[in-house]
Amino acid sequence: MWRTSLSLSSKRLNYLSSVLNPNHNPSTNAFAPFHKRYPIFDTRVGLNSFSHLYSSTIPKSYESTKLGLGLRRFSQLGIASAAVDASSSISRDLLHSVSHYGRCYWELSKARLSMLVVATSGTGYVLGSGQIIDLAGLCWTCAGTMMVAASANSLNQIFEVKNDSKMKRTMQRPLPSGRLSALHAVAWASTVGMAGTGLLACQANALAAGLAASNLLLYAFVYTPMKQLHPVNTWVGAVVGAIPPLLGWAAASGEISLNGMILPAALYFWQIPHFMALAYLCRDDYAAGGYKMISLTDISGKKTALVALRNCLYLIPVGYMAYKWGLTSGWFCLESSLLTLAIGGTAMSFYFNRTTKNAKRMFLASLVYLPVFMSGLMFHRLYDKWQSYAEDDSATAAVPSSKLLLESEYADYEEQLNNPATVKKQVRPPVAYASVAPFPFLPAPTYSHF
């Protein structure tokens, strides 16, 4: 019976499929027309049939809209990423340019040497100030000095570009190496030079600005060409190095006084052994660059060492002069003498044994001498004493007027005594100021016997 029912069901399905599908082949599976009619239920096809069926039910306009939105979003993301890449590339290029030119300006200005010049100028400003130091004025003076020193060093390298290209220690500078053009260097030197001089003129005084401008001209247009002409350039360079502390003193006090010459004198004499040691150590480079240094004609080095020793001895009385003129206390006189004997000892050792080792020792001693000397000046300075000396000088300027007044009164008294018409009259001699000044409340003495 089960077979009969199954046979009847099969026949009914075949009949229905033949009605629905005229091309039906009865020899195939009974469920084949059903799967063909409804492919979603065909497990042999899987989910692809379902997706195909689903996509067939969605309008074409929706699909195109969705595709357009996707392409637009993709294009927007591409543009944004391209913009980020471009901005990052510009930032990298800008950072590279700033780093490149900053390094070139640093080397062109000889920044370490310029900072040493600023230190001497700042020390001169402190020494020239009174009890209260104007910190703003000190900063403006140091900034102006830094600009002028950078300009002078830049002009020095512009004029010596060919010489620097022949020396090992200078051939990698910005101009010989081609990292910076000469026109660019001239623009830089002119800009910072005028800016520094103008800053000193506006924030300090005309005297400080004049000293800065004259020092710039002396270094760039006198000392620099003289290096290729005569060994006297070392002494001209020493004058250039002695002006910055005088500039600082003038910026603080507005004048140049005798006390203000202490630090410039020390710098002048200090630079000679410093330069002589450097000239002896770099004599081969100086010869290749074409510079006329005293060490080039001094084969044995005896003359070079003697010049260094002689100028070290000139430093001995500088500390005593600072004490004698009321700039520092007596302790600085002692400390300065010991410091000078130390650098003089290295110069004497170099004089008796002229070797590279002794020259380096004298050079290092000169590097230690200057900051210690300037620190001692500022630590032991007596700002009230030298100011009181200035006040005493201004007070004594009024003494001649009182003296002339006293002499005129005694002249009138003698004239009255010599005149016969006034002999019978009672003549009262002039009262001495010394007898009245201590006790102004007492009556003046009478002279009745006249």
Image: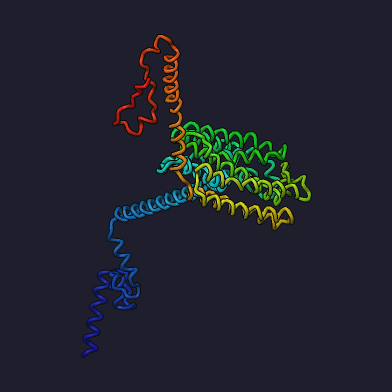
Residue 209: give x, y in percent of width and height. Answer: 50, 33
Residue 153 visible in the current orientation: no
Give the x, y percent position of residue 174. 61, 45
User: In the visual, does 189 lie left or right of 312?
Assistant: left
Q: Look at the picture and state if 7 lies above or below 189.
A: below
Question: Is residue 18 visible in this depiction of the protein?
Answer: yes
Q: Residue at x 28, y 70 (%)?
A: 38
> Residue 264, how many percent across, how many down?
57, 41
- From the viewer's perspective, is 46 left or right of 285? left
Frontmost residue, 312 versus 20: 312
- Viewport quadrant of the C terminus: top left
Q: Residue at x 70, y 58 (%)?
A: 357
Tell me the quarter of the picture where residue 222 sits: top right
Residue 59 in the figure: left or right of residue 229: left
Which residue is at the far bottom? Answer: 1
Q: Residue at x 48, y 50 (%)?
A: 379
Q: Nearer the viewer, residue 369 or 331?
A: 331
Locate residue 51, reporting x and y percent: 32, 66
In the image, residue 411 sits, relative to residue 326, either above or below, namely: above
Is residue 204 depicted above or below 73 in this figure?
A: above
289 with respect to 379 (left or right): right
Q: Nearer the viewer, residue 20 or 55?
A: 55
